Image: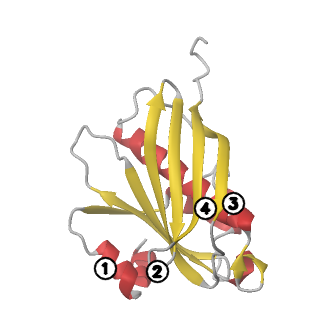
C-alpha cells in the first residue's frame, strides 16, 4: 500500500483528498491474491503498469458502531484498459464501480456493521455513462450505501475526474449470500 499512497500523494488533487486526518486509508483488499484465487482479476489481470497501476480506498472514520455509508477509491488507469483511443472501455468502468461498491460492503462486514452478512454478490448493476473516462488518468470512485432491506444492499456510485466532474453513475443491488447452514 505504501507505493500506492506515495503515488497518489504525488498527484496534488489526490494528496488534497487524502490529507484529512479523520480518514482511514487502506489498500484495495481485492488487489491481494488469495490462495483460493479469489480476486485474481484485480490482483493479477488488472494490476499492471498499463492497466490499473495503483489503487486505494479511503473513508471518514466512523464511530465504533456506525456503518460506513460512503467509501472512496482512487485508481490510476493506463492505456491497456482502452476501448477507444485514450478512452477506458465501458466494461472496465462498470467493473471498477462494481468493485468499489463491493469494497464498501466488505469494509462494513469486516467492521461488523452489517448484521449477519456473509459474502455479497451483485444482483444488478445499472450504469449511466455521462462522459468518456480518459486514459491514462486517475479517477475518484465514490460508493454510497443507500438502503439495506434484509439481505438486500442498495448502493450507488460515481466516477469523477480530477476536477470533480461526474463521468459515470451507477446503482446496484447486492445480495447477502446465505451461509450453507442457514435456512431459507
Q: Nearer the viewer, mark 2 or mark 3?
A: 2
Q: Is mark 2 on a helix, strand or loop?
A: loop
Residue at 31 percent across and 79 percent down: it is 16
Disc 1 and disc 3: Cα gap in Å?
30 Å
Residue at image point 62% right, 85% down:
136
Q: Name the residue under label 3.
A: 41
At 47% from the left edge and 44% from the top edge, which residue is drawn?
Answer: 105
Between circles 1 and 2, the one closer to the viewer is: 2
Q: Residue 16 carries which label?
A: 1
Mark yes or no: residue 32 visible: no
- First-in-chain label (4 vs 2): 4
- Which is more toward the observer, 16 or 107? 16
Comes first in the chain, label 1 or label 3: 1
- Describe residue 69's horizontal placement relative to residue 92 as left or right: left
Q: Mark 2 points at which residue?
A: 162
Mark 1 vs mark 2, CA separation in Å:
11 Å
Measuring from the top left, give residue 52's x and y in whole percent. Answer: 61, 74
Marked residue nearer the N-terminal end (1 or 2): 1
Question: Does the CB distance between marks 1 and 3 fall below 8 Å?
Answer: no
Image-based side of 112 in relation to 102, left or right: left
Label at residue 96: 4
Amino acid at each position: 500500500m505504501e507505493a500506492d499512497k506515495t503515488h497518489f500523494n504525488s498527484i496534488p488533487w489526490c494528496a488534497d483528498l487524502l490529507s484529512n486526518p479523520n480518514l482511514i486509508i487502506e489498500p484495495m483488499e481485492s488487489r491481494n491474491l488469495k490462495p483460493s484465487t479469489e480476486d485474481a482479476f484485480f490482483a493479477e489481470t488488472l494490476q499492471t503498469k498499463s492497466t490499473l497501476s495503483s489503487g486505494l480506498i479511503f473513508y471518514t472514520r466512523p464511530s465504533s458502531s456506525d456503518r460506513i455509508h460512503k467509501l472512496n477509491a482512487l485508481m490510476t488507469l493506463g492505456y491497456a484498459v482502452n476501448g477507444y483511443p485514450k478512452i477506458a472501455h465501458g466494461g472496465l468502468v462498470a467493473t471498477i464501480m462494481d468493485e468499489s461498491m463491493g469494497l464498501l460492503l466488505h469494509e462494513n462486514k469486516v467492521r461488523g456493521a452489517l448484521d449477519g452478512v456473509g459474502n455479497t454478490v451483485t444482483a444488478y448493476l445499472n450504469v449511466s455513462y455521462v462522459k468518456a473516462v480518459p486514459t491514462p488518468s486517475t479517477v475518484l470512485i465514490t460508493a454510497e450505501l443507500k438502503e439495506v432491506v434484509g439481505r438486500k444492499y442498495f448502493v450507488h456510485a460515481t466516477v469523477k475526474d480530477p476536477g470533480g466532474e461526474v463521468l459515470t453513475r451507477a446503482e446496484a443491488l447486492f445480495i447477502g449470500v446465505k451461509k450453507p447452514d442457514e435456512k431459507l
